[in-house]
Each structure stands twice: as C-alpha cells, then as structure tokens.
Amino acid sequence: MSRHQGDDGSCSVTWLKDTFGVPLISAGSYGLSCDYRKYLTRILLPARKMTYFFFEFWEYEGHSVKPKKWQSAYIYKKDNNTESCFWYINALEVGVSYFSNAAHFKEILRTEGDLMDLFKGNNRKSNVLIMCGTPNDVKNLQSKVEIPHDMVIVLIDIFNTVYYENRTSVPYMQNVLVVTLPPSNLSAISNRTGLIELLKNDYAAGYLDGVLLFGHILKKFLTTSEIKEPYSFIDEFHNITIIGAMGPVILDNVGDRDLNLSLIYTSVSTNNYTELLQFDTRTNGTTILDDSPSFIWKNHRLPSDVPESGKFSLIKIIVIVVFVDFLFPLKFLLLFRRYRKENELRQKRWSHIAPEKILPLNRTDDWHVSLKIDDDKRRDSGPRMRRGKYDKKVIILKDLKQDENFTEKQKIELNKLLLIDYYNLTKFYGTVKIGAMIYAVIEYCERGSLRDVLNDKISYPDGTFMDWEFKISVMYDIAKGMSYLHSSKAEVHGRLKSTNCVVDSRMVVKITDFFGNSVLSAAKDLWSSPEHLREEGISQKGDVYSYGVIAQEIILRKETFYTEQCHDSKEKMFRVQHYKGASPFRPDLNLETAKEMEIEVYVLVKNCWEEDPERRPDFKKIENTLAKIFSNFHNQSTESYMDTLIRRLQLYSKNLEHLVEERTKLYKAERDRADRLNYLLLPGPVVKSLKESGRVEPEFFEEVTIYFSDIVGFTTICKYSAPMEVVDMLNDMYQSFDHILDHHDVYKVETIGDAYMVVSGLPNRNGNSHAVDICRMALDILSFMGSFELRHLPGLPVWIRIGIHSGPCAAGVVGIKMPRYCLFGDTVNTASRMESTGVPLRIHVNKSTISILKRTNCEFQYEVRGETYLKGKGTETTYWLMGEMEQKYNIPTPPTVENQQRLQSDFSEMIKESLKRRETDGYKDNPATRVASYRNGTLEYLQVATSDHTGTYF
C-alpha cells in the first residue's frame, strides 16, 4: 500500500509494481495519468470520475432544477489546494477530459487577483465558478468582493462532513452548490470514539478500507486449495464490493473506487443545507432528491451560465428586431441561390474530363525515394488504383461505377467535392469515363499510404526519423484534415483508415477517399466504430473512433488494432461488436509504459474509443489539443506552415543521408564478399579484367608446370560406398589439398570427380619457380595421403597417382554463364598422360620438368623410372620425384604389388576387410582437424582429415 504526494510518485511506483506483478492499493494517485493502471487500486475517488459528474451536470437539462445545459465555466486553481483538490481541478482544466466536451468556454483563474478581476469587471463570459475549498474560503471571498446575484459557485469539498452534522447554513453560502460525499456509516465502530476521530481524516479512512480489502482478498485465496502467484491477485481487485470501515467499498472493472456524490445547496426558505441530487459514478446516473428547490436565484431555478445585463438585453432586443426585418428577404434570396445552384448541378454531365486528357506517365514522372528493395512491388500492389497524368499533375484513377447513371444526389455530392481545397485533403479533380468504367480523378501522393510508411521501418526508422514529435505531427495533420472535412459540405468521411491517409513528397499527411459516400458504401473493418458494426451507416463520431485506431497504429507502429489478446481480424471485429462486461474490447495502448509527455495523447486516443459516441471528442477539440501539445515542440506563433514543411524535409533529408551512408557500408561489404567469391572461382587478374572491361583476352604462356592426380580404385570405392559417403570422402580430401595449395604459388584449375588439376606459372609468370612450387606441393600432398583414411572405411589406405609436366599452353575464360578459366595445349594432355601412366603413391615427372629443376638452386631428389610410353607422344624417359635435400617429408611407401594387374583385386579385398572391421568396431565420424607442421624452423598450419584422434604430421 502506498500514498505519494502527486501522481508522479504513485504512478512511478505503479510502474515498478507492474514490473514485478504485485498489486498496489493507494489512497491517492488521483490524476488522469494514473488511470487504467493494471496493478493499481485507488481507494479514494479518482479525478476521472469527478469529471464524469461535472460533464453530466453541465449536460443536464429539461428539469425545473436546471432548465438548460451549461456550456461554460471559470475554474479557480489556487496554489494551496489540498492534494485531492489539486488533481480534481487539474482534471477539469486539461483539454482531453470529459468535462471539456461539455464546456465550450473554459478559463482558468490562477491567482486571487484574477478572481477579484472576474467579479469587478463587466465582461464576464460565464456565470459559473468552480473552485475547491470550504465555507470559510467562500466567506473570505465575499468579505473582499461582492459576488453578483446571478453567479453560481460550485464548491468541491469532498471530505467535509459539516453539511450533514450541522445542517444550519449561513447567508454567504446561499449562491453556492457544494459537491461532497454523503455521510459514512459509522455504526459498526460507534463504540470506538478514538477510532471515529481518526477516521475523520480521509486518508486514514482510505487506508483502513485498503487493509480490509486486502484482508478480504487474502482470506479468499487462503481458504482455497489453489496457490497462485502474486500477479493472479490482480483481477480479484476489480469488480468487487466489500463492507469497509464506514460503508460499502465498490471497485469498478479497473480497480477504481465508485461512490455517490451529493450536490448540496442552501434553502432560502429553511436556511438549511439541503441535498439537491446524487450522482452515482458507477452508472453515471443522476437522481434528483429535491424537485422543488428553494434557490436564491430568480424563479428558484439555476441561472443560465451566460451573463445577461440590462444594457445587453436592450441591445439584444434591438438586434433581434432589425434581424427579423432583414431575415425574410435574406432567406428568400438564399433559397433562390440554393435552388439555382442545385439546378445547375443537376444539369451538369459527370464525364466532364475527356479521356484523352488522361495521359500515361513518363519514366521521369514515376519517381519515388525509398530504400526498400520491394518498394516498386508495394506501389503497384493495388489492383484498383491506376496512375496517370492530368493537367501536368500525377493523379490516381479510382474505380467508382460501371455506368454513368449518377443520381441527382450523387451529382450534387460530387460537385461539392470540387469546391474542397485543403492542404491536408487530397484534391478531387472530377470523374472520367474510360471504357465502360467511371473513375474518380484524385491527387497522387508519392510516398504512398500512411500504412506503407509505418511498415517501412528502413526508410523511416523509429530512432532517427519516426520519433514522438513526428508522430504527433502526423496525428495533427489527420486531425486538421478531418476537422476541415467535417465543417465542409462533405460533412463526414465514412471510410477513414490508415490506408486512406497518404503522404506526399513533403512528408505532409493528406486524407483521401472521402468522396462519393452515396456512390461507395463503407465496408466493415477494423477501423469501424462499434455502432456502425452493429448497424449500417456513417457518422462524424464514427470517424472519431476510426481516428483513434489510426492513432494507435501511429504510436505503436504495429498491425492495425494491435492487441496481445487476439490477432485474428474477424475475431477482433466480433468482440468489438458484441462486447460483454464493463470494459469494451479495444486495442492495446498501455498507459503504464507511457512517458510523461505522452500521457495526454494516450488519454485523448482512449477518449476517441469511447463506447458512447457522445463521449467522444469532436475533431475541432482533437485539433486544438494536438496543437497545444505540438506547440511544446515548436512555437507555432513564430513558425509558419512553410517553416514546418522545411523542418520536416530537413529531418527526412538528415535521415536519408544516414540511411544512404548505412546502405553504402552494406554495399561495400557485399561487394567485398562478391569479390572474395570471384577470387575463389577465377584468378585475381582475370577477375580484375572482367570487372573493368567485361571480358578476358586469351593469353599464351611459354612455360608452365601442370599437376594432375586422381584416386586409385575410385570406381571400386564408389561401388562399396553410399553417394553421400563418396561426397564426404572427396570433400575431406580436397579441402585438405586446398589448404596445402595456400602455401605455394599455384592456381587450382578444377576438380572433375576424383581428378585434381593444379598449374603454376599462370596467370602470373614466375620464371622457373613454377616447377619448384608444383613439385613441393606434390610432395606435401603425397605426405598428407600417407596418413589419410576414409571415415566410412577405416583402415583402408587411399592411394593417389600424381603426374607432372612442364611446357607451353594457352589460357582464357570460356563461356558467359558460369565462366571457367581453362587451359589449352599439348602440355595439358601430356600432364594427364603422366598421371595415368604412373603408379600409386608415386610422383611421376617428365624430363621437361626435371630440366627446369636443374636450372634452379633447389636440390630435389629423383630417380629415373626409364622409358615410358605416352599416348600421342611415344616413348620418353620419365622420373620418380622422391623428395628434396634438407627437407623432411613423410612419404608413404608405395604398394608392393609388382604385377599391376593384381592391384585391382587386392584393393577390392582391402575394401572388404575394411567393411568387416567397420561392422566390428563401429563407424567413427570425426571432424577435420588442424595440425602444425614445421619446415626449416617455420610453423605452418595445414588442414587434414583423419579417422581417429591422432595427429598427422608432415
């Protein structure tokens, strides 16, 4: 339980309770900013319910007590008000309260000097003064100034019991109406005199009721077998009635206290305080208790809220006489002009824009700035919208009818729209017949609908552009447009939604689709008000409800009618139309998460959702409220409309620069990634040539060294392996080969099946180093194969044949799609023959390569194989490469089978033995490991794949 001085304290505590899910009972938190808090229970009367009373009393009429409505008031907001009075007066002051809907004129008096000037002057605009205080405050006031006889003082004195304890009144209270609470029931504690005195303090009484309430809820839970978390208590504090210390404690559906308020007056016939009426905050119902009050005012009735002096009455009579003399001829003239205008409208043809005047768009006309990739798809997604050009302006063609048989009512309505020209409404140019369809010709706005802008969080991010100020300006634009529309001849929109609010190039929001209510029917959707979901029709108050739904979209930037309870559109509409309970179904708009500057806007939006249409504010009041809020950001007295536009465009330009910079970084990162991929597919110089000129000239190289290798018995291995096992085998092997290549000046040409082809000396010429690099690479690969095993065939040795040859060749890029860098010439064929005529685990080298090695300072070890027949070349002397001096290679021992014809059958037997071992030992699937290799004291890292956890060194 908590009580804080002011709403900031109490409500901040409420936010803390919301975080931990713990109920809060408060004898305070009166203000509007504490309304609708999920975890807050208010034991004393909140300010919102006080505004209900004033709204209903000002609207009350038709009874002898109060024949007419009141529409004005002065409000005295003194500095030394009690806490409850401060928040009651503050709630009557703000522009979004219910009372503001009844009081068309409302002026706040903040100092005693303002109050004195009100009574001394002759230019009063209202006869009603609202203030907080006690009879002593009224006495002090009347001792300083004479109060006019037709003045009514409404005194808020909620917790004072003097009006019931001592009913005798005093003369200075005769023109005062007192708002107070009826006497409490003290019978339950009548034998506790000290406690009665203590409970005369309203906060003490409130806290005692709070303790009793909490005890009641706690007892209820303790008597049940089910143990619940603290947050499950929350609903138990809503819609409940208990017996408190001084009478019933009634809480509504949001945990706020409901009470009966009494209105007391001084009877001039008995000189006693007398109850005039009671107001029930639960039902908002008024009960008259004195049908024949004895007021001090004329005819024992409450006076009009508008002052009338003798001089003013005389002037009024004169004006009325003059007006009546002038009225009849003026009325006749106006009726004649109206008849003539309507007759002209009836005669006017509605295919008045010739089809040939509607031109197709040029490419330069169809511009749009957006950073969304799918923006063009978004703009062209509307099947019923077509763009064109009319009178040098880009326009939209919207379907109206399939025939041109407009009724007189429709013609008059459409002609009225031609007269509407307002910067927050799209311009209606008329209609045009194209083919069999009649289209409305409407102004086009480049940035699309407001719904599109809200969805586009790339071009309009929350942090840098769509901030609170911009959201207020968007809501303000819509309110201005609707205020103008409701006061125009169009009178009502009927289809207001975020998709019918469009944004132009200057970031100004305009309302569209407000034409043709007699032609186009309003569909039922998430923006439709409850009364129009139940019954067909459109109204200005229905537009206000639709505006509230749009405002929630703008504030949250989530889906239309967003609520965590439900996500299905049809279910949402059903629950709005057929709501049950005290609280109607509405979108989520959590006040507890709102900042201080956002509270007034949130309350305004919730007022637009009122179930009772009459409780919703009109657009003029919405416009004025938002103008006041918007002025907190910018001084509108010194800022013109053009200044606002320029500021918006500067904000958008700054955001656009930020986004362009961000997109440029992403583009560079993507370009670098593409370059890295290209360098993996093609040599660096080739990629550079392709980027610069789009083509690669073929080139001849005088001397290169080519490496070929393949797997011995690959077909046999495939016979005993699953396809994915073959893929894994090649991937393990060639990934390791690729890492070995990184340590040599070589270029991998391609892999075809089990064949692996590498070249050195192109595209970058490197003298005689090409033979050295290829030979060293071949020795590293052969060393690696000495310890490589297949994961799916453990224990089976994998043999490869390697062939090397040096000579001239040509190279170039072949093809446009999936281009490949290919080598051509006899050197390629000879290198392939060297591999195919070799033996397992041997490096077969041609004499051309050996001659190049002899010209270098490197001392490679090799032995003569002898004369070898090479297809297409004849017999040549070839060599086995054995190693390099002062370099240690772990060269595996070649197979001992001398008869090569027996090698295939022996290899098959090895595979079968490996399969038997696999069935016995199980299958090990070890990932590739990275091990270190030292050569000449230099640490190198090579990627190898092994079938066990032992390292492989070479």
Image (cartoon, rainbow, N blue to C red):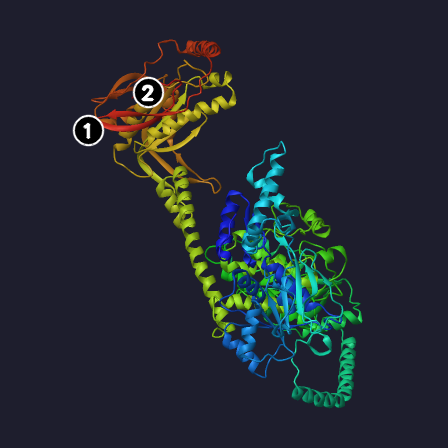
**Residue that appears at 43% across and 59% down:** 657
Residue 378 showing in the rendered view: yes
Q: Is residue 935 above or below residue 296?
A: above
Q: Nearer the viewer, residue 379 or 455?
A: 455
Q: Is residue 176 above or below residue 773?
A: below
Kindly report which numbered mark, 2 or 1, lies closer to the viewer in this rendering: 2
Q: Position of residue 818 (x, y in %)?
A: 47, 39
Q: Which residue is mark 2?
A: 952
Residue 233 found in image quarter: top right
Q: Nearer the viewer, residue 395 or 561?
A: 561
Residue 223 found in image quarter: top right
Q: Which mark is residue 378?
A: none
Q: Nearer the viewer, residue 132 or 334?
A: 132
User: In the structure shown, which secondary structural element does the residue marked by tag 2 occupy?
Assistant: loop
Q: Position of residue 212 (x, y in %)?
A: 59, 45
| Amino acid type at mark 2 | Thr
Q: Which quadrant would the C terminus be assigned to in this image?
A: top left
| Amino acid type at mark 1 | Asn
Residue 215 found in image quarter: top right
Give the mark count: 2
